[in-house]
Amino acid sequence: MPKQQPKITKTPPRTERIRIAALPSWLHAETAEAVRSRTADGVWVWDFVLGKGERAVLRRRTQMPVSVWAERHRVVHNSSMPGRWRNIVTPYAAGIMDASFAPCVQTVVIMKSPQTGGTEAVHNCVAYGIDRAPGPALYVYPDETTARENAQDRIIPMLRASRRLSEYLTGSADDLSSLRINLAHMTIHMAWSGSPARLGNKPIRYLILDELNKYQSSRREASSEDLAEKRVTTWRRKARIWKISTPTIKNAGIHAAFAAAEARFRFHVFCAACGAGQLMRFEGIGWPDDATDPMTVRSRSQAWYECEHCSARWTDADRDMAVRRGSWREESSGLELDECLSRSQPMVIAFHIPAWISPFVSLSEIAGKALAYRQTRDEELLKDLQNNYKGEPWEERHALRAEDSILALRDDRPRGLVPGGGQVAALVAAVDTQDDGFVYEIRAFGWGMAEESWCVREGFLPVDWNQLARPQGSDIPWRYVPAFDPLRQVLWEDSYRDEQGRIYPVQFALIDAMGHHTTEVYDFCRAHRGQILPFQGVQRMNVKYGYSPVLHYPGTNRPIPGGLKLLRGNSTFWKNNLSNRLGVAPTDPGAWHYHAELSGAWARAMCAEHRDEKTGYWICPKGTPNHAWDVAHYLLIAADILGIKMWSQAQAAEQEPAPAPEMNPYTGGRQMFGRSA
């Protein structure tokens, strides 16, 4: 039997009945009569069928939270986890997105660590606005290059990747530029700080201030932040402002906005072991007590987070599970996000996202960074930890030191004795040149990244700069200055031993060259090339230190045979570093030790300078001796140049001892200028 074809039935057209009670008076008489003739019973029947587009236009949209919309329509393009947006990856982002469109909210502040998903959450909010509540949008970035790159690499791909958002593209390539994206029903503008022209003359509904703390300022205009915020005035309560940034310093940029918010939220998590809720803190991150290598801690995932209630140690996976069960709570009232918005109706809300709640940041990465700082006391590492992992502003902590705090760093060694037990890697020295002599310190630095150090010898060597002499029978064209003889003896002719009798030579030294005796210092450094460098301190530099060639003696055109290298050091950086080291307890790694005979005068000189919080520079009150403080930060530079913290103790033990240096025939010590008599 032939196969029966399925019966196709057409959907009957939807019939609508429109009842006309009375015709309007303005209707033409003939038209009115025609209508009456067709509606004798008072009903005019009109048959029609709605097309797909008509149904889409007329359909009443149900209310939908941004987080739900994002999972349905957002496709992540430029990410380590491309594909459909999933709230489970960064659960804390869902609350931020939903709160952004609460009726009472106008401004959302996100103070965050880098790469925690905060910016993508704001992109979701803008995408939701494009689809559900269109209005002109403005993205503001720190500079033009960043603005153009984000338009091409993030925003336009976001529009193209989503089926829902791509419906709003016009199809014209001219509408997708790096400065202006024209959609069928709204425009997205790109701008950058320091350019008032790009920030003005645009009514804006959605304003995104990204990386706020990196904004440049215009000398003739108000701040870029203020100029941009004025663009939303005409939209009143329908406008939305997002401020996003990693913090830098306290009470500036994103931290100032966070502190000024009416409600500030922090993310509370729930332990998978005991179910107790808690706010994750940096102090909860731990690692093995015997761990010494930050890279090993990170690569072997040795860190954990300890629950404050049951002491369970969370792995990264446990942490992620705890975060998925978490929620936002207002920091002062403890109310959950929705309840706080309902009760308090805040216009400005703020969220804090530290790195340890992000699935993209391992607990071991944070622990490795913390261990590296504890070992080195490097202030830059502490800043990185504070800003980029804690997500909190950096606050300078250089309190005024007291003489007693320096004297408390003394141990029981006599002056001149090197610590024993094989814990010393090298001796370095620093000299501050004065009109009446030299202030010096010789310091022993230990093995490893902690750079623990011990003062071996310090003091003042009086000199008479007027005693000049030239070696007999020598054709050397520069002066031999007897003033350096005592210094030469202290640095390279005296012996420094530990309790086992092991001798430690001074391997490297720096000497201040910027006083009244620069020429003499240059000649002294020439005579001892490879052992000592002339030094100049600079308050502000882009690097820790650098070298400048010196070809002529100061104030003359007389060349320096062979030239010299002048070491220029960032004194602000190294004094900050020194200040941090002085705060380390004597029993902790990285401590700054003195011998038992240290004088009160030397301790007072270590407390002479204070830090100006406005400029960040170190200030010495007029007439206050600070030479001990100066040579102390020279010593840090000398140790860094040698790279002592990277030396291998095992390899050093295999090396043969260095031969004794040649002697100076004029002083009975080291040979002058490295030549025979």
Image: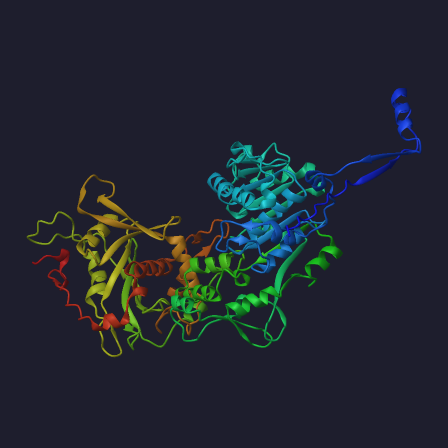
- Residue 499 vertical placement versus 620 (above, below): below
Quadrant of the image occupied by residue 309: bottom right
Q: In the image shown, does 222 or 232 lie closer to the viewer? A: 232
Q: Position of residue 18 (x, y in %)?
A: 86, 36
- In-image side of 50 versus 140 (left or right): right
- In-image side of 441 versus 339 (left or right): left
Q: Position of residue 507 (x, y in %)?
A: 24, 63
Q: In the image shown, does 364 or 568 lie closer to the viewer? A: 364
Q: In the image shown, does 58 or 525 lie closer to the viewer? A: 58
Residue for point 38% across, 72% down: 410
- Residue 41 vertical placement versus 675 (above, below): above
- In-image side of 176 versus 448 (left or right): right
Q: Is residue 217 visible?
A: yes
Quadrant of the image occupied by residue 12: top right
**Where does the C terminus fall, quadrant-wise?**
bottom left
Q: Is residue 252 visible?
A: no
| Direction bottom: furthest residue | 500
Q: In the image shown, does 578 or 672 lie closer to the viewer? A: 578
Residue for point 19% across, 66% down: 493
Count the marks: how many?
A: 0
Q: Position of residue 25 (x, y in %)?
A: 91, 24
Residue for point 23% across, 55% down: 464
- Residue 300 vertical placement versus 471 (above, below): below
Q: Position of residue 396 (x, y in %)?
A: 49, 57
